[in-house]
Every structure is written in C-alpha cells, then in structure tokens.
Amino acid sequence: MTGAFRVCQSMQKTFFQKKMDSVQYSAMVVGSVSACNYGATVKQRKIIHVDMDAFYAAVEQRDNPALRGKPVIVGGDPGSRGVVATCSYEARAFGIHSAMSSARAYRLCPQAIFVRPRFEAYRDVSLQIRELFQEYTDMVEPLSLDEAFLDVTENKPGIEYASHVAREILQKIFQRTRLTASAGVSYNKFLAKIASDVKKPAGLTVVTPEQAEEFIAGLPIRRFHGVGRVTEKRMLARGIANGSDLRQCTLEDLQRWFGKSGPYYYHIARGVDKRAVVPNRVRKSIGTETTLGEDCADKGEMVLILNQLAKKVELLLSARNTSGLTLTLKIKYDDFQNVTRSLTQADPIDDAETMLSLAEDMLARTEAGMRPVRLLGLTVSNLTTDIPVDETAQMELPFHLN
C-alpha cells in the first residue's frame, strides 16, 4: 500500500499555517510568563526541556507542501505489521499516537497519508538544532533526536532569566528550520520535562519553585516520569490518582508498595529531583530488533531472522570499535507479552557467529515455537569501551522485517 489516501476537504486553514501563526504569536506574547520569570534564586538550577512538535511528521510537512494541513503518519505500511513512529497533529485528532499499529491507525483515519521515515533528514535537522543549543550552553543532554535538556544556570549570552533563554531558542529554531518546538522551564528535570508538554505545539511553560506544589498536585499519576501502565494500575488501586494523593503517602508506605522506586516517588511528589543535566551520556548497549511481517511459530525461521539481526549488531559494534560481555534476546509473543533472556560471557562478544550461537541457546529456553512470535531483538551490553550516545541508533525503529 502506497498510503496516498484521500484527504479531508473540510479544513479551511491548514494546520501548518496555524502553527506559523502560533509561533509568531508566541514570539510576541510568550513574555507574559515574565510574571513568573524563573531567574535569580541563589544556587537554584535553571533547567529547560526542549521538545520538537511532532518532529518526524513536521519535517515531512515542511519538505512536502502537499502534506501540510493533512493527517500524516510516519511509520510502517498499514497493510503490513508496521507501527506508527509519530504523526501530525491533524492525525492525532483522530486518536492516533506513536507505537500504535499502522493497521489500527488506518482504521481510525482511512484518509491519512502514510509516509516512510527519512531518518537521515531527521538527523540533519536534529544536528542543526543541537548546534543552536550549544550557542547558549555546553550543558546539553540529548534524550533523542527531537528532545533535550539544557542547564542554563550559567549560559553563554549571560541571560538572567531561563524563560527568556527558552523563548529565544524556540524563536531561533523556527527561524532556522521552519519547525516549531515547545519548552518547559523549571528548577529540575522532572518539572521541566512535564512542563514542555503543557502547551503543545509551540508553547512555553514555566514552573517556579513557588508554583511547583500546586502544579504537581494536579498532575494525573500517569504523567509522572517512571509511572507506566502497570504501576499506574497499582497506584490507582491504592487510591493514588494524582500528585496530591501521592504526596499524602509516607516514605515507608511507598517503599513497601513499590520497593526501590518508593523513595523516587516520594521525592518527586514534593518537587525534588536532583538529577543533573549530563552532556556526555555513555551508551550502555547496542542492539536492534524487528517486528515480523507475520506471526512466526517456526523456530527454524526464527533462527534465520536472528542471524540477520546478529550480523547487523556486529556491524554496529564494529562501527563503534567496541564489544560487550552480555547478549540479550528479546521476544514479543503474538499476545504482546515481552520476555527477555540474557547470557554473560567472560570473553567479549563482537561477532555474529557467537551471537547467533548464544541466541539459539536462549531461544530454546523460551516458549517460542509453541507460541507464535511477532518481534525478535538482540542487544549487546556491558560494553568494553565507553561509547557516547549516538541518536542515530534510536532511529532504527521496528517498522517491519525487510
């Protein structure tokens, strides 16, 4: 399926044009946050989280005017086992989101236009934005191609208020790339990241120390970093639905209920997050995975796929001149249950033959074959050298099996 579907005709003004208006408006009046300008508190950190708006889809709409104002989905073909990498805001209006199967996205919006990802184009834009960040601070921690933390407590232009730095950055991103971004400003990473999502797209939200308690109290528990679906259900079962509820819990209770994560939940409910912005993160693993075109119950076919994955991981390790001591096999069954198996060797792992041999041993310790499999992955960890995080590895999303 090529994905060139019919588009809704009812949109009088394209969303792309509205975004342009939004940026121009923000550039003029976003300074209204000056009433809560977050600045001169002694030794108080000034953290910005910048998040590009619907990044992949926005690049596609920028580069292809015919896509502007239309529901665009970047990802796999809806006729296969592909998944949505991201989608435009027009598509999100139909309930489509990242990681959704492309087939379901098509059912929700048959008129959507499906576009195969162009990772090199996204990487080029990401590097352009990274260079802009460096004009303000060297304390930049990339999280992916489209988002990063910046510590601007001490910044190169000497701007007093972090909100002013953030506003300048958002304006310059648009001037240089014709793309919009949103930013959150606060005194720690937890609050800055949540704040960046409050006024998307093209928004700027500041959370001062004085505002933090009220801001956190109203947050649904699912918005807290580290709270996934399973933890959310466990919290809701205990009557913890938002930040206010979480704050009422004692440290002892949270430790008893959630183990080692208990102190983390206790502190973030009180606006405490001491994590520093780390400019040079080190990669902990190198791997790849693939979503199969059809569920597979044939172990022989699985071994062939694992051989392909092992060769790819070997190339990735070779390109970075490294090896690892641990190999992990990832399997997702047809009911979406994930399982992993790991083996650690005394000798470094860096070749496909060794990886395949270990992977076959681990495969035999799973229910693969008795249960159909939809995804396979191999990852090497315990790396023998420090490898800086390279966002290109994050672009190898499991859209389909070639």
Image: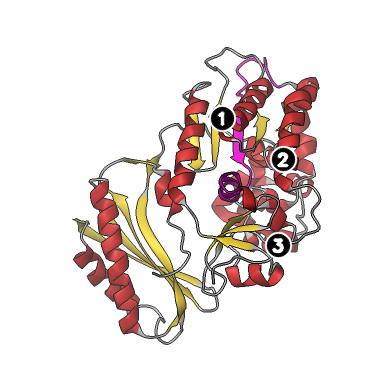
Which element type, helix, strand or loop, lies under badge 1?
A: helix
Q: For residue 24, what is the image quadrant?
A: top right
Verify CB contact (< 8 Å) between mark 1 and mark 3: no
Would you say residue 203 is visible in this rendering?
A: no
Number of numbered tags placed on the structure image: 3
**Residue closest to the eye, 5 or 114:** 5
Mark nearer the N terminus (1 vs 3):
3
- Using a 10 Å C-alpha cutoff, classify the residue at mark 3 as few (fewer than 14 neighbours), some (14 to 19) or many (20 or more): some
Amino acid tagged 2: Lys
* Label 1, label 3: how far apart the Cα atoms are: 29 Å
Q: What stretch is highlighted in magenta?
A: 38-64
In which quadrant is the N terminus drawn?
A: bottom right
Amino acid tagged 3: Val
**Residue closest to the eye, 375 or 178:** 178
* Label 1, label 2: how far apart the Cα atoms are: 15 Å
Mark nearer the N terminus (1 vs 2):
2
Q: Mark 2 points at which residue?
A: 19
Residue 7, numbered label: 3
